[in-house]
Amino acid sequence: MIKPPVLILGARSDIGKAVAHKFASLGHPVQLAARNASTLEADKTDMELRHGVSVTLHEFEALATETHDAFVAALPQLPEVAVCVVGLMGQQAENERDIQAACRVMRSNYEGPASILAVLANSFEARGSGTLVGISSVAGDRGRATNYVYGSAKAGFTAFLSGLRNRLAKRGVHVLTVLPGFVSTQMTEGMDLPAKLTAEPGEVADAIARAVAGRKDVVYFRPIWRLIMLIIRNIPERVFKRLKI
Amino acid sequence: MKLSGWGRYPVLEARTHRPRSVDALRNLVLSEPNLIARGNGRAYGDSAINTSATIETRHINRMIAFDPASGQLVAEAGVLLGDIIAAFLPRGWFPMVTPGTKFVTLGGAIAADVHGKNHHKDGSFRSCVDWIDVMGPDGGIRRCSPQDDAAMFDHTLGGMGLTGVILRAAIRLRSVETAWIRQTTILAPNLKAAMAAFEATQDATYSVAWIDCLGTRGNLGRCLVMLGEHATHRDLPTGKAQAPFQTKTKRKLSVPIDFPAFALNSLTVRAFNALYYWAGARKTAEHLVDWDSYFYPLDAILGWNRIYGRKGFVQFQCALPLDQSEAGLTALLAEIAKAGSGSFLAVLKRFGKQDSAFSFPMDGYTLALDFTVTRKTLALLEQLDQITIEHGGRFYLAKDSRMRAETLRASDTRAADFRAHRDSHGYTSRFRSAQSERLAL
């Protein structure tokens, strides 16, 4: 039996690739969507060789929201699972100085991802099945001085996913919110991250595949982050505003 | 960041880079004054550490092509042997040569020219490599093979990454009918018996011995010599034969903490060794073992290096020429038993013939064992070095973390030739590791 396809939005990222490999290893054909998709040709060959599934490449620009309807319509097959890994961290200091840079971060983490998932949500709802996975971030759980531009956009995305889940719960469509803490990727390279709190992209991918199969709603990874963020959310604002975290 | 090899000794502060593409890697080669490539960090010591620029290749890890007619796989250097097994064993292919862990990269396997339990029959990793692409100091890529640019090929296999950055390679896989190994065990009560067993079983595809390093007098060098053959379809009972590549995935154990220093001492090791020997003695008849348990027993215990505690451990591995093997091994074992610093993981193996400019194996025997790092064991290792040199032996650089440059020169005349080759091609100043500096390579 041929398994249904899985779409990866933002397939060039480390987490995107890891998720693609994971679903391919489970026997799913994979649709890789990214900007300049043709540069993923070597990854396509790699995934096909390793997992013996078919891999297709699709040009995708998260910020060109006007193209999203056509993008979904042009897919060879409506996927069963769509995983949105699109995101941009930027530099907080630059985001404070340069409002255009800040807007790019806001749009890349909220507007683009929400737009494409909204289009897919309508198609999935019409079909009456499917899973939408949004990779948000623990940074969205509370705004902090060190990365609130990124965090605020992720907060918006988390809220969007929560609303989408609420809307689609009775329509057979599953919405999974993934909240990674630190992950060892290109985005965090050079940052001095505590090893015990830092996950490898492959571990995040395994957790996502489990959560999709188990129809989970919200997954923190590593799981310890649920506790860490519970504490951080509950610090009174008058104390929090003086902290450096 | 703090960086070490698998033995967690020494630990050095090093700058690391993780290029995602060949272009990014080239930029590093062109901009860093000197550097070393690092695969998955499974060399035990400081082979893959350059304090100013260590280039991790684990993101350059794509498979490029596979030819099911010849079994040739072309892949980037960061691909793990475990990835190759995961992808190709279900289709009936297995690495031609594999070391005792599947967590090594293709690049690392080439750089160390690793060997496996079939060295006596099939040679080192080199024998399955058709060609290698190597990035030189100018950022250019050279393809070398035993036919074309043979000197580059010779010096890159076993060259510890000191001839350039290994980018891609074509290797031949072995066709197998099942994922199972037929294992038999020969009980050898002492070294002489163990060597006789190896000599009598040269036709076996795989052979390796676990050796009790704390045995003394009559028990000196008692071994379990373990032989293996790839099981064919006919060798499997009906249940297994229906899915010949399916073996149960074992739950991985991991060592969550560093063991305290007292956990490993000569009493616990002695007790373990006695139990292990007699457990082996009860199961000598042929039986089926799955590929993972057979080739990679320690991989099932993630982070087993923590058993040796916070200070880390060192491994001693030497090869001795055949005519000196018995005398050399006897002297080494006597010295180890006298010091009482045994280890759980002591391995004896018969090597076959070996070609190459700087690879480790030689026609004869190899002995490998681990020690917790203490002043006493470091002194013992110096003694073992001397005994090895006196018997014409040499040392495995993938395991070394503490040898002196003079020791290397005294043990291996090829070291000076290797250095001369590096000098003449402009590699010496550009491709350097903490180990190459220590050993003046």
Image (cartoon, rainbow, N blue to C red):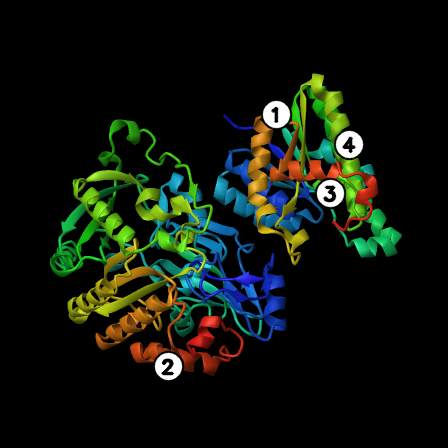
Determine whether, in the image, residue A186 is placed left or right of residue B14. Answer: right
Front tag of 2 and 4: 4
Front tag of 2 and 3: 3
Residue displayed at 48% across by 50% down: B65
Specify which label sits upstream in the sequence, 3 or 1: 3
Name the one closer to the observer, B39 or A232. Answer: A232
Q: Chain of mark 3?
A: A
Alpha-carbon neighbours of circle 1 within 10 Å: few (<14), some, or many (≥20)?
Answer: some
Residue placed under numbered mark 3 in the picture = A139
Q: Amino acid at mark 1?
A: Arg
Verify CB contact (< 8 Å) between mark 1 and mark 4. Answer: no
Q: Are the residues under marks 1 and 2 on the same chain? A: no
Name the one closer to the observer, B372 or B296. Answer: B372
Q: CA distance from mark 2 to mark 4?
A: 66 Å
Residue placed under numbered mark 4 in the picture = A159
Specify which label sits upstream in the sequence, 1 or 4: 4
Q: Are the residues under marks 4 and 3 on the same chain? A: yes
Determine whether, in the image, residue B338 is placed left or right of residue A82. Answer: left
Residue A9: image quadrant is top right
Alpha-carbon neighbours of circle 3 within 10 Å: few (<14), some, or many (≥20)?
Answer: many
Query: Looking at the picture, does residue B409 appear above or below residue B373?
Result: below
Q: Secondary structure at mark 3?
A: helix
Q: Amino acid at mark 4?
A: Ala
The x and y percentages for residue A213 are: 57, 27
The x and y percentages for residue A154 are: 76, 40
